[in-house]
Image (cartoon, helix red, strand yellow):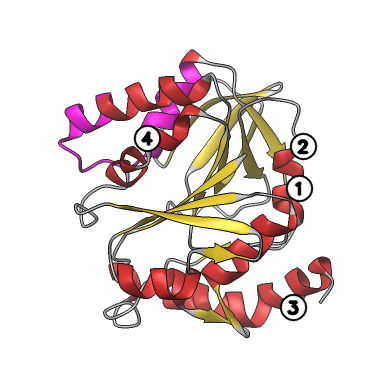
Amino acid sequence: MKAIILAAGVARRLAPLTDRTHKCLLPVGDRPLLTRMLDALGSIGVRESVLVVGHCADQVRAVAGDTHGPMRVLYVDNPEYTRGSVLSLYAARAHLAEPALIMDADVLFPREFLRRLARAAAPSAFLIDRGFEDTGEEVKFYTRRDRVIALGKKVVPESWEQVGEGVGFFKCGAEAGPELVRLLEQVIRDGDGLNEYEDALHLLVARRHVGWVDVTGLPWTEVDFAEDLRRARDEVLPPVARLDGG
């Protein structure tokens, strides 16, 4: 399995910290978020990571390099990185012909996340935290039994059994990949490329069985705002480091 890491966007909500650097390069402890993510992928045996780059692409390439331990690092350029994230994932569509982990680059998490996702029985699955605080910023995932039935910031299905926040990681199985590419194309057409890739995932779960993996209670955070970065460094990193063994 390979990983597709979306690391193209500008992250204006973190300005001025991200005016001249990408937010995945912001340090958390002794390493940037991106380096921690690559370390985690290497720890579960991922042999190839594909980084979709745009904003400060040269800096991202300089930090990640062409290899990370035994793992190869490849790059896909998204020249339209100031528009919707759907264009970033679509830029990497050739890599969806085989199983892949699709990951946002701005998440601090323990390696246990990837272990659970990789060994999930379902070929396609999301990581979900049911212990979230609903601020309106979260991409919420609604489940019924062992499958996700809907997702989005504003989507609410008629009925569901569990709801949680998505971590931003998706294991995309071999059969789901080509269908996801077609749905990305549909979302791009309908939204003129200004939509988010989660809109295509919402369409996917209506057409195909996609499972979910519970990570409730484990420490993690997405970094969207300056307060998220402070929390990542001061509150989330210590328990993540303990779980990772140092």
Q: Identify the residue at image location x=66%, y=33%.
A: 212
| Crowd around label 1: few <14 · some 14–19 · many ≥20 (10 Å) | some
- For marks 3 and 1 on the same chain, the one whose residue lies earlier in the sequence: 1
Q: Is label 4 in a helix, a strand or a loop?
A: helix
| Distance of label 2 from label 1 (alpha carbons) | 6 Å
Q: Is label 3 in a helix, a strand or a loop?
A: helix
| Distance of label 1 from label 4 (alpha carbons) | 24 Å
Which secondary structure is most common in the magenta stretch? helix
Name the residue carrying label 1: 115
Quadrant position of residue 133: bottom right
Amino acid type, residue under disc 4 in the picture: Arg
Name the residue carrying label 3: 238
Name the residue carrying label 2: 119
Nearer the viewer's eye, disc 4 or disc 3? 4
| Crowd around label 4: few <14 · some 14–19 · many ≥20 (10 Å) | some
| Distance of label 2 from label 4 (alpha carbons) | 24 Å
Q: Are marks 2 and 1 in contact (CB under 8 Å)?
A: yes
Q: Identify the residue at image location x=45%, y=54%.
A: 74
Q: Position of residue 161 (x, y in %)?
A: 66, 26
> In the displayed image of the protein, which residue is found farthest to the left?
192
Q: Are marks 2 and 4 in contact (CB under 8 Å)?
A: no
Check residue 199 for magenta coloring. Answer: yes
Between residue 154 and residue 224, name the one nearer to us.
Answer: 224
Name the residue carrying label 4: 93
| Crowd around label 3: few <14 · some 14–19 · many ≥20 (10 Å) | some
Residue 46 shows in the view = yes
Q: Is residue 165 left or right of residue 238?
A: left
Which range is magenta? 186-206
